[in-house]
Image: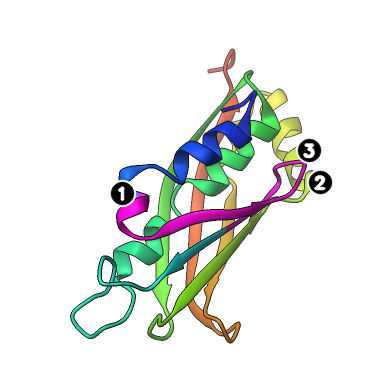
């Protein structure tokens, strides 16, 4: 993944849980610091009231900040998901999208702190939006980062 993120993204689109929930990576920037993920509503991912199942909305946000940061930092760093929080703001109908982005300056800050031997716990936020660009849910992810050779 760290060497070939596009290969991983192709694999992710065939990952059975994502297939079952109609979750797809639909775009990425050349530097792999931005990813766009989408889920279309279907019988496979709707809840009892006919809207997106909350687990689908969370799953479409689960790995992507971690994957972006793993690639951006390279092999000398440990990156883990540590915690998450999702707030549902309105029912998800139709197709929903989330755009994940970590600015290069933020990557540099995290790398510098980890290089000083610090344990870093950056927080990232993403909005899941509907086709009218209204926010359906907001997800906050807490990651854990450190250099591999530091304790």
SS at circle 2: helix
Position of residue 63 measured from the top left corner of the image (x, y, whole percent):
47, 46
Which circle's residue, 1 or 2, is located before the other in the chain?
Answer: 1
Residue 44 lies in the magenta stretch? no
Residue 46: assigned label: none
Position of residue 84 measured from the top left corner of the image (x, y, whole percent):
42, 56
Residue 17: assigned label: 1
Position of residue 42 measured from the top left corner of the image (x, y, whole percent):
32, 72
Q: Residues within 10 Å of mark 1 (few under 14, many from 20)?
A: few
Residue 129's place in the image compared with 140, above or below, is below
| Residue projecting furthest to the right | 105
Position of residue 1 measured from the top left corner of the image (x, y, whole percent):
56, 28
Residue 108: assigned label: 3
Quadrant of residue 147 within the rendered picture: top right
Q: For the residues labelled 1 and 3, say whether their Cβ atoms are less than 8 Å apart.
A: no
Report, in whole angstroms, how far the alpha carbon at label 1 lies from the one at label 2: 33 Å
Report, in whole angstroms, how far the alpha carbon at label 1 lies from the one at label 3: 33 Å
Q: For the residues labelled 2 and 3, say whether their Cβ atoms are less than 8 Å apart.
A: yes
Q: Residues within 10 Å of mark 2 (few under 14, many from 20)?
A: few
Q: Residues within 10 Å of mark 3 (few under 14, many from 20)?
A: few
Report, in whole angstroms, how far the alpha carbon at label 2 lies from the one at label 3: 5 Å
Residue 105: assigned label: 2
Q: Which residues are magenta?
A: 18-36
- Residue that appears at 52% across and 80% down: 130
> Of discs 1 and 2, which sits in the foreground?
1
SS at circle 1: helix
């Amino acid at each position: 993944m760290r060497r070939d993120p596009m290969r991983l993204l192709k694999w992710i689109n065939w990952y059975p849980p994502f297939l079952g929930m109609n979750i797809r990576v639909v775009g990425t920037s050349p530097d792999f610091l931005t990813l766009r993920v989408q889920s279309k509503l279907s019988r496979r991912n709707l809840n009892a009231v006919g809207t997106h199942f909350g687990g689908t909305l969370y799953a479409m946000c689960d790995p992507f900040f971690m994957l972006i940061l793993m690639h951006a930092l390279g092999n000398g760093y440990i990156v883990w998901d540590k915690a998450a929080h999702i707030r549902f703001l309105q029912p998800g109908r139709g197709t929903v999208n989330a755009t994940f982005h970590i600015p290069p300056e933020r990557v540099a800050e995290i790398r510098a702190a980890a290089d000083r031997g610090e344990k870093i716990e950056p927080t990232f936020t993403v909005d899941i939006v509907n086709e009218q660009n209204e926010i359906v849910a907001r997800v906050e992810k807490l990651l854990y980062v450190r250099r591999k050779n530091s304790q």
